[in-house]
Amino acid sequence: MAEPIRMNMSQPHMNTNHDILTLTQWLSPAYPVGAFTYAHGLEAAVHSGLITSGEHLRDWLDDVVSHGSGRNDCILLRAAFNAVSEDDLRYVNDVGLAFAAAAERQLETRHLGMAFCKTTTAIWDALDVELIYPVAIGKAASQRNIDPTLTCALYLQAMAGNLVSCAQRLMPLGQTEGQAIIAALTARCDEIAAATCVCTLHELQSSAFLSDISALQHETLQPRIFRT
């Protein structure tokens, strides 16, 4: 099946404040997707001593956003945004599942996506299908014509924010230091969101190997407090 067509970048999206507020609502910690229960392999990384300080955490999250699942999720989000048919959308979804580096990564993106679709359908009468998380957000943004670059940037910031919150339950990390880490990653979130505007599904890849290995190790980690 042919890959969905890229967005025409010569026609920028002009979003209203209402659109932006809708997007921030979707990516808010208050949106009932249960993101706080998923640590994306971070728990195993802290347990094994790979992350022992705020500096380590910042570098780890920078790699995830720039070279790992963060970047890949942006590519999937954009492909879903540009999907021209249900078959194209399902293809993007299947590719996203195939690129999940571990069983727990599949569980995470499936369950977050299911919860997002359920709530978004109930409120906005949309997404009456089950999709993985970045694909669901990309499709929802497309239905409301919300700029995909803005969507990607806020998606990455929300990912970083959730993982910082997880880290604060796993290691000595104060609120101020945690917010400083998120602020330090803001420019990176913008950079990756913009850079993926020309990417296709053929450019999915990950070189954040320690993050992927930690996701595998977490499957057998006991005791543990997070689902992934």
Image (cartoon, rainbow, N blue to C red):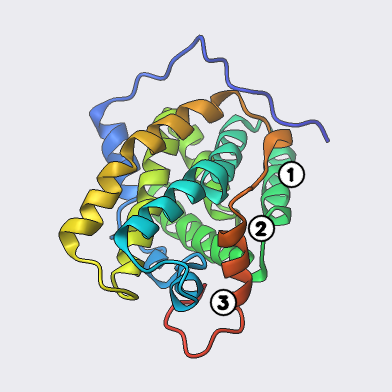
Residue 214 vs residue 225, the one in the foreground:
214
Residue 126 visible, this angle: no
Residue 87 image point, x, y percent: 74, 41
Residue 111 vs residue 210, the one in the foreground:
210
Give the quarter of the image for residue 202.
top right
Q: Is residue 192 left or right of residue 90?
A: left
Q: Which mark is residue 91?
A: 1
Which class describes the residues within 10 Å of circle 3: few (<14), some (14-19), or many (20+)? many
The kind of secondary structure element at disc 2 is loop
What's the residue at 40%, 38% (across, down)?
Answer: 189
Which class describes the residues within 10 Å of circle 2: few (<14), some (14-19), or many (20+)? some
The kind of secondary structure element at disc 3 is helix
Q: Is residue 8 above or below residue 91?
A: above
Amino acid of disc 1: Tyr
The disc, 1 or 2, on the residue closer to the chain's N-terminal end is 1
- Residues under labels 3 and 1: Cα distance? 29 Å
Give the quarter of the image for residue 18.
top left
Q: Residue furthest left?
A: 176
Residue 196 visible, this angle: yes
Q: Is residue 34 left or right of residue 28?
A: right
Residue under numbered circle 3: 218
Amino acid of disc 3: His
Q: Is residue 76 left or right of residue 90?
A: left
Q: Which mark is residue 158?
A: none
Residue under numbered circle 2: 100
Amino acid of disc 2: Ala
* Pair 1/2: label in front: 2
Residue 128 image point, x, y percent: 56, 52
- Residues under labels 2 and 3: Cα distance? 15 Å
